[in-house]
Amino acid sequence: MYRQLNFQKTHLTLQCLKQRITERFPKSSLVEVCAELEALSSETEEKAKHIAEPNTTLRTIIGFTIVSALILIGVSISMMEFKPQKIAIQEMLPLIDAVLNEIIIFGAAIFFLVTLEARIKRAKALKALHEFRAIAHVIDMHQLTKDNEDQANNTASSPLRSMSNYELSRYLDYCSEMLSLTGKLAAYYAQNMPDAEVLSAVNDVEDLCNSFARKIWQKIMIIKQQES
């Protein structure tokens, strides 16, 4: 029961987070970012399951192609007149070399066809994971200027800081939660498709989110220390 991510509970957690952000910062653009993450979450379950499902049409075509090729090769061999006693060793060597080359080419073609479905699925999963990587950067952009520095020495281009320390810590905490949920949604693809490259991409997204979250928690700790 607790050995796999429950997508519905993850999505409900994200919806609750969006509501909390809306109630505390109704005019903040962070609400829109969370809404975008919620929309991405709504697509994740169906998209991940669709990618993981076997492509029966493609498998049928590949199977038919391989069987047809084998039958064609078998028919071609059966039509050959092969008389070893009339062939010298010198004449056999080029024939053996040609046969080996054909076997290598045919084996490579079979390998390409057999792994085609996995490569198509991998490409779709990596494209979907790129969206989580992009939104993690967007979330990080929203916390860049959020700190409690003294505004006495501000310049004309300095960002306006109108939040109290409590509001600021809540805002940063919401960003941290969004990053955590982004990593969990990305992990859902690895759960449904245990491909090495997909697993690596998921780990990259989670590492990115954790790296951004550490920066956020450093700011939160500074705020807490100043309050104490």
Image (spheres, rainbow, N blue to C red):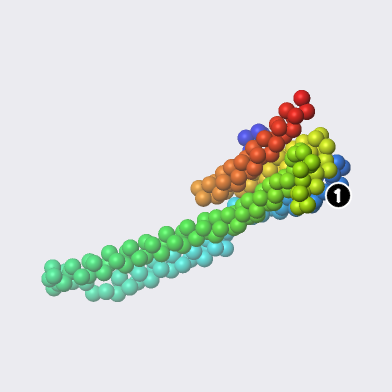
The image position of residue 174, as x and y in percent, is 76, 40
User: Looking at numbered disc 1 in the image, what kind of residue is underneath it?
Assistant: Lys
The image position of residue 46, as x and y in percent, is 69, 53
Q: Is residue 170 above or below residue 40?
A: above
The image position of residue 5, as x and y in percent, is 66, 39
Identify the residue under disc 1: 27
Asked whether, in this view, residue 58 is left or right of residue 9, the answer is left
Q: Is residue 4 above or below residue 110?
A: above
Which quadrant does the C terminus fall into?
Answer: top right
Label 1 crowd (10 A; few <14 / some 14-19 / many >=20):
few
Q: Residue at x 59, y 42 (%)?
A: 207
Which quadrant does the N terminus fall into?
Answer: top right
Q: Is residue 164 above or below residue 81?
A: above
Observer able to see residue 10 = no
The image position of residue 57, as x and y in percent, is 57, 63
Determine which quarter of the picture holds residue 15.
top right
* Count of number-bearing discs: 1
Determine which quarter of the picture holds residue 72.
bottom left
Observer able to see residue 26 = yes
Asked whether, in this view, residue 203 is left or right of residue 93, the answer is right
Q: Residue at x 64, y 37 (%)?
A: 214
- Residue furthest top in the image: 228
Q: Nearer the viewer, residue 51 or 90?
A: 51
Q: Nearer the viewer, residue 149 or 190?
A: 149
Q: Nearer the viewer, residue 100 or 26?
A: 26
Q: Secondary structure at mark 1?
A: loop
Q: Residue at x 27, y 64 (%)?
A: 100
Q: Nearer the viewer, residue 79 or 213?
A: 213
Q: Residue at x 44, y 65 (%)?
A: 66
